[in-house]
Image (cartoon, rainbow, N blue to C red):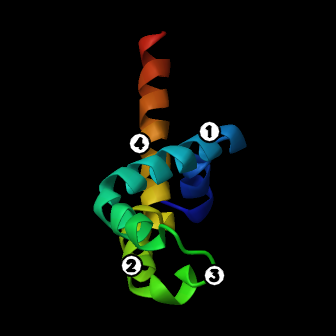
Amino acid sequence: MGYVQEARENHVKKKVEEALRSKMKQKALKACDLYTSKYAECAVGRTLSVVWQCRKQAKELNECLHQFTNDTVLEEMKKEYALQQSGKESLSY
């Protein structure tokens, strides 16, 4: 499969991509809830000191979130969306 054809297959409209990104972020936050809670607990009552006092928790949270929010995950979601849309189109004929 050529690059141009693959790019066309993975292309989705801007609004659809934004919705997929939002869905990806929601899934990531849900999956990383434990790390989010740890960071939030550390941050309670702090202002500027949160930067250095909660560095470990922030790093753990970011590492977890990155597993679920990267270009590879987004491309997979785009492929799934395109397959769903092509399935709907074939049903309407």
Q: Position of residue 23 (x, y in %)?
A: 48, 44
User: Which residue was labeled with disc 2?
Assistant: 57
Along the line of sight, the residue nearer the viewer: 44 or 35: 44
Q: What residue is at 42 percent from the left and 59 percent from the top? A: 73
Answer few, some or many: residues within 10 Å of disc 3's Cα (few below 14, many 20 plus, some between 14 and 19).
Answer: few
Mark nearest the camera among 1 and 2 is: 2
3D distance between C-alphas at marks 2 and 3: 15 Å
Q: Earlier in the sequence, mark 1 or mark 2?
A: 1
Along the line of sight, the residue nearer the viewer: 13 or 45: 45
User: Which residue was labeled with disc 4?
Assistant: 80
Amino acid type shown at disc 3: Leu
Q: What residue is at 49 percent from the left and 29 percent from the top? A: 85
User: Which residue was labeled with disc 3?
Assistant: 48
Secondary structure beneath dot 3 equals loop
Task: Pick out the residue farthest to the front.
Answer: 45
3D distance between C-alphas at marks 4 and 2: 33 Å
Amino acid type shown at disc 4: Glu
Q: Earlier in the sequence, mark 2 or mark 3?
A: 3
Amino acid type shown at disc 1: Val
Q: Earlier in the sequence, mark 4 or mark 2?
A: 2
Mark nearest the camera among 1 and 3 is: 3
